[in-house]
Image: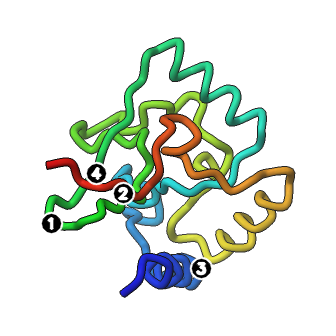
Amino acid sequence: MENVSVLEYVRKGMEDNLYNYTRDGKCSGCGNCCSNILPMSKKEVDVIHRYIKKRNIKKCKHMLPVVTPVLDMTCPFLDTDTKIEKCKIYPVRPEICKQFICDNEQRAKHNRKLIGQTRTVIDVRKEFFNESDITERRT
């Protein structure tokens, strides 16, 4: 399956509300919703740039060792090595992250509304770490 068709499949599943990782309808903190592709305003991008520079935040990698080229579509700010406080930029996370509820049938409509409010879809790795979401594995 090509990368584009995989992404389209995942996007469709999210739109159709197939992915529900909540506990009793509340966020479980699992990080499964943390994506590398997010709609953000220019202001959000600027605030995050300042925040990661001030705190010297490094990207997290989430790679499957058997996949080449590596496709890491998980947010580079998601630290899966911790049980709590998984988001390295939580205080300045984008509005889409603040508003996201993985078991909300209105979510897709809400997300489309946010995109229409002077937000651009951002490749987070590329924007904040100068790296594409697809990288060749170095041996």
Sequence-earlier tag: 4 or 3: 3
Residue 28 visible in the picture: no
Q: Nearer the viewer, residue 52 or 85?
A: 52
> CA gap, disc 1 to disc 3?
29 Å
Where in the figure is residue 69, as x and y percent of width and height?
Answer: 30, 63
Q: Tag 3: residue type? A: Glu
**Residue 26 position within the rendered picture, expressed as x and y whole percent measured from the top left:** 46, 58
Q: Secondary structure at mark 3?
A: helix
Under mark 2, the amino acid is Asp
Closer to the chain start, of discs 2 and 4, is 4
State the mark number for residue 62.
4
Pick whichever, 66 or 91, lies toward us: 66
The numbered disc on residue 15 is 3
- Residue drawn at x 70%, y 28% is 46
Q: Nearer the viewer, mark 3 or mark 2?
A: 2
Give whichever of 58, 29 is nearer the camera.
58
Mark 2 neighbour density, 10 Å: few (under 14) some (14–19) many (20 or more)? some
SS state under label 2: loop
Q: Is residue 131 above or below residue 137?
A: above
Indicate which disc residue 8 carries.
Answer: none
Image depth: mark 1 or mark 4 in front: 1
Residue tagged by mark 2?
72
Q: Residues within 10 Å of mark 1 (few under 14, many from 20)?
A: few
Mark 3 vs 2, N-terminal side: 3
Q: Quadrant of the N terminus?
A: bottom left
Horizontal and vertical percent position of residue 139: 13, 49
Q: How many dots with numbers?
A: 4
Q: Secondary structure at mark 4?
A: loop
Residue position for label 1? 66
What whole-number distance in Å separates the C-alpha atoms at marks 2 and 4? 6 Å
